[in-house]
Image (cartoon, helix red, strand yellow):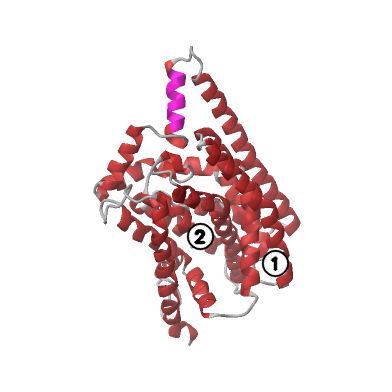
Amino acid sequence: MGILLMNITAFAMPFAAYANPANFGTLRWPDVAMWAFGFVIVDGKMRAIFSALFGASMLLLADRAEAAGRSPVRLHYARTAALLLIGLAHACLIWDGDILVLYALTGAVAFLFRRLETERMLVLAGLLLAGQMAIYAIHYQALAALGAAAALPDATPDVVQAWRNVLDAIGRPSPSVLATDLLIHRGPWHRLALNMTGREFDAIASELTFNGPETLGLMLLGMAGLRLGFLTGAWQRTAYLRVARTAYLIGLPLLAVSAVVLIAKGFPPLLTATLDDLDMPLRWLVATGHVALLAAWFAGGSSPLKARIVAAGRAALTNYLGTSILMTAIFDGWGLGLYGHVERWQLLPFVVGGWAAMLLWSKPWLDRFAYGPLEWLWRLLARGRIPEFRRQAIES
């Protein structure tokens, strides 16, 4: 649900607008306010939680397989291969903001460390996260040097063009780049699919470089969080609240300062991209606070809303991919064609509608069936046999 709140911008307008609101659309105060809320509260936090939970579920399934006398290695890599196929179909045919391919490839590596002692797992996770920050620092230092060289009076055409390419990719795209993006997304589905497929190999390489170490580190943190009881609700409610309070008191004010600086400076391309990535440790910290706050809330007893959220989580793959299908049908040219026509602040009703859809369908479906539709397909592809679908058949 939180991921939709961030991804909605990339569904509805050029991807360059995701992190920098000055790249597309208006900059009226409602648009800036929605960007600032996402930057401080949501961006990077939901993906961090998703990555940690993926690692935790990987370890949980391996432990269950061993307890049942099955091979955890065979189960994991069959599931990973199936997830890779699903992710590639998602990235090439539906939406190019897919994260499942990265999870499948990174998860294949993360599984190798599942038997590490918890302390060593935490150390390795810390080293990976530090390594990711080093990659970001080196990358942006090189980009700053390129930008400075391109600004010199005697800059060569090649240097100027290289800097222009950087701005087109992560900074402030030229009008021609934005026009091409709009044309593709407002056009027929087959042209969009060909474009996404043609860019997928480069996208995978970029994801592994600029998100791979972070994702692997977060998966290991998820495994450790499962073992330590943090992700299972085993801690005292007061302990969860203490973690949330500490994480928020440190992380939120510092992220708010970054947001204020960017707003005051008018979102300069390189500074915006740099802060977006170098603020990652604060995002990991705030993500921990979010998890702790949710754990404390669930420790307070059951409720109809909590039951529906649990069901939405049990059908996470279906909700994730279903959101992509629904939102591309609304915004892309093969559907309603609203791509590039809706301002940032006007996207909130679409998010609320997506949340409502998740909460309304997931519980009634799972009251009757054992899995969400795509969870069932995942099991079918991984196991090579048709799983039981109806809950009554499994329970009997």
- In the rendered image of this protein, does residue 166 appear above or below residue 63? above
- In the rendered image of this protein, does residue 341 appear above or below residue 308? above
Residue range in magenta is: 158-167
Q: Earlier in the sequence, mark 1 or mark 2?
A: 2
- In the rendered image of this protein, does residue 369 appear above or below residue 163? below
Q: Residues within 10 Å of mark 1 (few under 14, many from 20)?
A: many
Residue drawn at 55 percent across, 80 percent down: 303
Name the side, left or right, on which 390 lies relative to 59: left
Residue furthest front as drawn: 29
Viewer-proximal residue among 53 and 396: 53
Q: Which residue is mark 1?
A: 240
Using the rendered image of the protein, determine whether residue 235 is visible from the camera's viewpoint: no
Q: Residue 123, image x and y in percent?
A: 73, 50
SS for tag 2? helix
Viewer-proximal residue among 187 and 356: 356
Q: Quadrant of residue 237?
A: bottom right
Q: Amino acid at mark 2?
A: Gly
Q: Amino acid at mark 1?
A: Tyr
Q: Which residue is mark 2?
A: 2
Q: Residue 282, image x and y in percent?
A: 64, 49
